DNA sequence: AAATTCGCTGCAACTA
DNA sequence: TAGTTGCAGCGAA
C-alpha cells in the first residue's frame, strides 16, 4: 500500500459489474504525476423516514424487499442501515438506503412511496459526486492524504492501464498553491468569412514559463511563433500543445461561450477525435442556456464566468471585458485591438500585431487566474465544490453547497430541493418588505459622520436564531419576536442556519486576526485576504438564500424577519442619535449619516459605544468614516431628496460617489466626467468653477471637438432580442446589427452613439463604430446638462445659467 | 438556471 | 401636443 499527498482535480462516476464507483483524478505532488483513482467502498445513498418512529425496523425490512423488474434486470437496494439524524430540531431514526447506481433511485422511488411504513424520502436529489466530497470533507482547496493500492484499471470508460484503489482519503491542513499545479491559459482569434467564423490563431501561456502563438498565413519571424496551413492543422497543433504541456488547469476568459464552444464545433466538423482530456477523453459540453465545457482530468476554469457571477460587485468597472477586469485586478490591461482591425490585418496578411495582441491576452488571462487562485481554493475549501464548479458557481450554489457539507458533518438532514409546484407557490407569494431608506433633504452639508452595522443581516440571523425550524408563533417572553410580525424564533436550540453562519463568522474572526498580523507584501497575506473574502461572500449570501424560491432552506418568514429586524435597528439608531443631539441626514439599510454640528468625532464615537453596549448578540455598529463635506440632491420629480444618490469628501479630499450618473454604465463618458468634476468643485466649495467648466464642455460639444469614444453609451441586452416589446435605443441598434448578420446575444453590451439623424432617439442611435457624427443637442440636453444639473440644481443653479455663458440658441 | 429588496431615471408607447 | 404609465437598466445596500 502507498501513501501520498495529492491535489484533487476532477471527479466522475464509472461503472463496473453493475456498480457505480466514484472516480477521482488527482495530482501526486511528490512527482507531479496525474493519476486516476476509484473508491471501492463508497455508494450513493438517500434516507427514508418512517411514518412513525416505532416503524423504523418495519420500514427497513419493507425497503429491503423491494424488487423492480426492468428488462432482464431485477433492481433492488444494495443495502440499508438504521441511523440517527437531526431532522428539523429533533433527533430521529431513519433508514439510510444504499444503491448500486444513482439511477436506481428513479426505478425504486415509486415503490418506496407505497410502503406501509413510509413517511418521507430525503437527500434524494444530491448527486453522488457531491455526496462523496461533502461526506469526506475534501475539495480542491486543500491537499489530501491518500492511502491506496495501484492495480489494473477495470473501467472501460478510461483508456488508461493503471488505477489507484483508494483505501483512505483525508483532507490535509495545507492549502493548494498555484505552483503545485501546471496552469495554462489560451486564447483564440477568429475572423468572419461569409458569415462563417474561422479560427486564424491561438496563443497559450503557462506558469511554467512556456508560451507561444500558432497562426495561419505566412510565417512571421517572431519568437515562439509557428505558422500552419489550415484551420484543421491549427486545432491539431493545439491538441498537441495541450498534451505536451499537460496542464492541470486551463484558464480561459469566456471559454464556455466562445473558445471551447467554437473548438468543439470545429472538431466535430472535421470529425477529429482528439483527446484533450485525461484517459482518452475529449471535450464534453453541457447545459443549454448557459453552456459549460469540461475536459476530463483537467480543470477548465472560465474566468469570465466567475467574474461575472461572483466577483463583479467587488470591482469598480463598467464592463467585464478582460481588459477592464485585468486592469482593475492586476493593473495590467490588454493591447488595443478591435475585431475589425484583426480582420483588416488578416486580409493584408500582416499578422505581427495580432500575434502580439493574442499572446498578451493569454498572458494576462494566466496572470489573472494565478492572482485569483487563492480565492478559488478558499471557496472550494469552504463549499467543497471542485474548481470546475467554483468557476461556474452562483451565490446560491455556494450557500447550498456549504449547507450540504455542514449538514453531512453535523448529521443534520438536508432538505430536498423544492418541487415545481412548491417553487410556483413560493413565487406567487411575491416580494416581502425590505430595508428602510431615510429620505435626505437636498443640499450641501459639513462635518458628516457615517456609521454602519457590521454585516447587518448575518448578525441579525445569528443573534435572533432565525431559521426555518426555530420559527414559532408562541411568542410569550421571547426576545426574538420579529418587530413587525406576530412570530418569533426559539432561543434554543440553535437552528441549523444560524449555527452554520456562526461557524463561518467565527472562522472569519480568526482569519481577520491573521490578516492583521501578516506583512502586507507576503504571499500569506494575499492568501488570508482571499480566505476572508470567501468567508464574507458566503456569509452575506445566506440572507438572500432564505428568500430564494429555489432554496433548500427557503422560508419567506425568515428572510422577512431579517429585514424587519434590520429596519427596527436602523430606526432605533436614528432615534437615539437624535436624542443625543445629532442631526440625522441620511441612512440606507444599515447605515446612518450624522451631522456633528458642534459635537466632535470623539462624541460620535462615545455615542456609538453607548449604543453598542445596548445591542444584543453580535449586532454591532461600526465607525465608517468622517467627511468634511457631502451633498444630497433632489429627485428629478418633486422637491424631495433622492435616495441612493450622494457624494462625500473626506479630509484628504478623497471623493466617494454613490448612485449618480457618474457611476452608471448607461451614461456617456463625457457626461460622467463632467459630473465628477462638478462634484469635486462643489465639494471643495467652488461652485463658480463648476459652472464655468460645464459651459466649456457644452461649447466643445457644439464645436464638434469631442472624441467619439467619450460619447459612447453602453447598455446591456438583458434578454434575447425577440423578447422585447418596446424599441429602446440599444434594442433598436441591436436589431439593426442582427439584420446585418452580426451576432447578437443576451448579455451583450451594446455601445452606441446618438447621431444627428432625424427621428426618435432609437432612430438616431447607431453602433459606435458606424456613427459618422453626433447630435450635439442630444449630448448637451440629454447627457451633460442633466448630469451636471443633478448636482447643481440642488444648490439653486438653473439650466439657463449654464447655457448663458455659451452662445446657445434654442435647443429644441 | 438558480441570493434579496429599494430606488432612480430615460425612453417608448399610450391616453386624452 | 402634453401628460401619464410601464418597461428596462443599473445601482445601493
Image (cartoon, coloured by chain):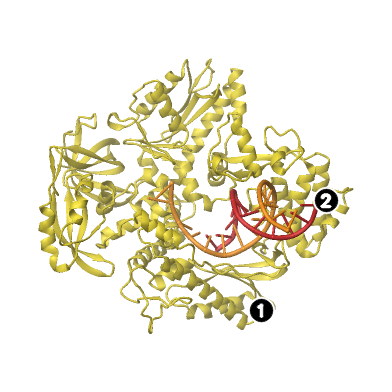
Chain colours: A yellow, B orange, C red
Give A356 or A477, whichever is nearer the viewer.
A477
SS for dot 2: helix
The residue under label 1 is A599
CB contact under 8 Å: marks 2 and 1: no
Say which quadrant the N terminus of chain A sits in: top left
Identify the residue at image location x=60%, y=69%.
A587
The earlier-in-sequence mark between 2 and 1 is 1
Is A674 left, or right, of A371 in this rendering?
right
Q: Residue at x 42, y 57 (%)?
A: A538
Decide which of A754, A406 is in the foreground and name it: A754
User: Are discs 2 and 1 both within one chain?
Assistant: yes
Say left or right for A800 vs A428.
right
Image vertical order of residue A511 relative to residue A101, above or below: below
Label 1: element kind:
loop
Name above or below for residue A119 compared with residue B12.
below
Circle on res. A695: 2
Locate residue A418, reporting x and y percent: 35, 56
Percent across and percent down for residue A617 are 42, 75
Question: From where the camera sits, is residue A461 visible?
Answer: yes
Residue A447 sits above or below residue A354 on the image: below
Amino acid at each position: 500500500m502507498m501513501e501520498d499527498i495529492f491535489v484533487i482535480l476532477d471527479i466522475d462516476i464509472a461503472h463496473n459489474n453493475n456498480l457505480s464507483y466514484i472516480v477521482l483524478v488527482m495530482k501526486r505532488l511528490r512527482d507531479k504525476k496525474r493519476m486516476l483513482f476509484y473508491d471501492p467502498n463508497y455508494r450513493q445513498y438517500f434516507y427514508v423516514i418512517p411514518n412513525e418512529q416505532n416503524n423504523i425496523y418495519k420500514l427497513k425490512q419493507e425497503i429491503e424487499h423491494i424488487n423492480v423488474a426492468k428488462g432482464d434486470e431485477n433492481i433492488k437496494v444494495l443495502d440499508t442501515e438504521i441511523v440517527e439524524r437531526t431532522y428539523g430540531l429533533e433527533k430521529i431514526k431513519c433508514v439510510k438506503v444504499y444503491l448500486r447506481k444513482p439511477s436506481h433511485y428513479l426505478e425504486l422511488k415509486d415503490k418506496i412511496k407505497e410502503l406501509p411504513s413510509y413517511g418521507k424520502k430525503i437527500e434524494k436529489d444530491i448527486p453522488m459526486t457531491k455526496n462523496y466530497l461533502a461526506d469526506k470533507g475534501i475539495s480542491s482547496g486543500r491537499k489530501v492524504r491518500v492511502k491506496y493500492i495501484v492495480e489494473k484499471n477495470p473501467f472501460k470508460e478510461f483508456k488508461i492501464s493503471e488505477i489507484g484503489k483508494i483505501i483512505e482519503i483525508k483532507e490535509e491542513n495545507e492549502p493548494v498553491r498555484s505552483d503545485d499545479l501546471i496552469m495554462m491559459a489560451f486564447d483564440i482569434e477568429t475572423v468572419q468569412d461569409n458569415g462563417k467564423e474561422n479560427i486564424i490563431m491561438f496563443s497559450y501561456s503557462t506558469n511554467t514559463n512556456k508560451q507561444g502563438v500558432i497562426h495561419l498565413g505566412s510565417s512571421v519571424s517572431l519568437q515562439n511563433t509557428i505558422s500552419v496551413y489550415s484551420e484543421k492543422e491549427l486545432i491539431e497543433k493545439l491538441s498537441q500543445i495541450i498534451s505536451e504541456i499537460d496542464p492541470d488547469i486551463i484558464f480561459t476568459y469566456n471559454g464556455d461561450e466562445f473558445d471551447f464552444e467554437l473548438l468543439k464545433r470545429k472538431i466535430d466538423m472535421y470529425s477529429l477525435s482528439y483527446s484533450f482530456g485525461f484517459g482518452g477523453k475529449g471535450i464534453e459540453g453541457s447545459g443549454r442556456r448557459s453552456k459549460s465545457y469540461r475536459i476530463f482530468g483537467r480543470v477548465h476554469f472560465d474566468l469570465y464566468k466567475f467574474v461575472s457571477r461572483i466577483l463583479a460587485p467587488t470591482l469598480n468597472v463598467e464592463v467585464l471585458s478582460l481588459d477592464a477586469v485585468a486592469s482593475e485586478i492586476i493593473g495590467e490591461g490588454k493591447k488595443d485591438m478591435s475585431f475589425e482591425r484583426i480582420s483588416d490585418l488578416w486580409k493584408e496578411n500582416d499578422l505581427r500585431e495580432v500575434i502580439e495582441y493574442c499572446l498578451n491576452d493569454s498572458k494576462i488571462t494566466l496572470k489573472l487566474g494565478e492572482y485569483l487562485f487563492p480565492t478559488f481554493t478558499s471557496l472550494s475549501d469552504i463549499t467543497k465544490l471542485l474548481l470546475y464548479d467554483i468557476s461556474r458557481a452562483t451565490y446560491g450554489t455556494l450557500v447550498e453547497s456549504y449547507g450540504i457539507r455542514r449538514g453531512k458533518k453535523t448529521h443534520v438532514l438536508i432538505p430536498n430541493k423544492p418541487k415545481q409546484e412548491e417553487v410556483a407557490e413560493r413565487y406567487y407569494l411575491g416580494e416581502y418588505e425590505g430595508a428602510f431608506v431615510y429620505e435626505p433633504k437636498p443640499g450641501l452639508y459639513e462635518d458628516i459622520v457615517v456609521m454602519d452595522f457590521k454585516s447587518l443581516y448575518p448578525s441579525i440571523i445569528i443573534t435572533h436564531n432565525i431559521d426555518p425550524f426555530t420559527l414559532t408563533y408562541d411568542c410569550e417572553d421571547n426576545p426574538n419576536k420579529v418587530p413587525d410580525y406576530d412570530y418569533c424564533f426559539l432561543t434554543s436550540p440553535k437552528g441549523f442556519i444560524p449555527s452554520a453562519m456562526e461557524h463561518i463568522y467565527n472562522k472569519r474572526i480568526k482569519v481577520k486576526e491573521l490578516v492583521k498580523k501578516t506583512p502586507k507584501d507576503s504571499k500569506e497575506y494575499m492568501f488570508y485576504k482571499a480566505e476572508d473574502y470567501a468567508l464574507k461572500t458566503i456569509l452575506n449570501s445566506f440572507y438572500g438564500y432564505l428568500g430564494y424560491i429555489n432554496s433548500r432552506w427557503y422560508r419567506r418568514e425568515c428572510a422577512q424577519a431579517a429585514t424587519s429586524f434590520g429596519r427596527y435597528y436602523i430606526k432605533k439608531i436614528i432615534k437615539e442619535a437624535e436624542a443625543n443631539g445629532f442631526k440625522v441626514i441620511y441612512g440606507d439599510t444599515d447605515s446612518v449619516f450624522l451631522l456633528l454640528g458642534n459635537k466632535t468625532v470623539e462624541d460620535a464615537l462615545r455615542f456609538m459605544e453607548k449604543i453598542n453596549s445596548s445591542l444584543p448578540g453580535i449586532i454591532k455598529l461600526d465607525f465608517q468614516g468622517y467627511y468634511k463635506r457631502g451633498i444630497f440632491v433632489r429627485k428629478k420629480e418633486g422637491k424631495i431628496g433622492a435616495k441612493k444618490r450622494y457624494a462625500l469628501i473626506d479630509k484628504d479630499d478623497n471623493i466617494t460617489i454613490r448612485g449618480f450618473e457618474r457611476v452608471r454604465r448607461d451614461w456617456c463618458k463625457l457626461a460622467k466626467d463632467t459630473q465628477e468634476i462638478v462634484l469635486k468643485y462643489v465639494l471643495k466649495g467652488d461652485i463658480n468653477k463648476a459652472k464655468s467648466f460645464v459651459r466649456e464642455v457644452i461649447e466643445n460639444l457644439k464645436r464638434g471637438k469631442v472624441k467619439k469614444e467619450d460619447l459612447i453609451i453602453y447598455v446591456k441586452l438583458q434578454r434575447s432580442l425577440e423578447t422585447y416589446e418596446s424599441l429602446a435605443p440599444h434594442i433598436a441598434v441591436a436589431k439593426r446589427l442582427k439584420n446585418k448578420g452580426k451576432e447578437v446575444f443576451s448579455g451583450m453590451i451594446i455601445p452606441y452613439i446618438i447621431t444627428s439623424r432625424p427621428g426618435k432617439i432609437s432612430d438616431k442611435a447607431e453602433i459606435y463604430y458606424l456613427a459618422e457624427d453626433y447630435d450635439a443637442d442630444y449630448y448637451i440636453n440629454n447627457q451633460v446638462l442633466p448630469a451636471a444639473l443633478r448636482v447643481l440644481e440642488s444648490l439653486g443653479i438653473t439650466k439657463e445659467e449654464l447655457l448663458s455663458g455659451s452662445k446657445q440658441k434654442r435647443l429644441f
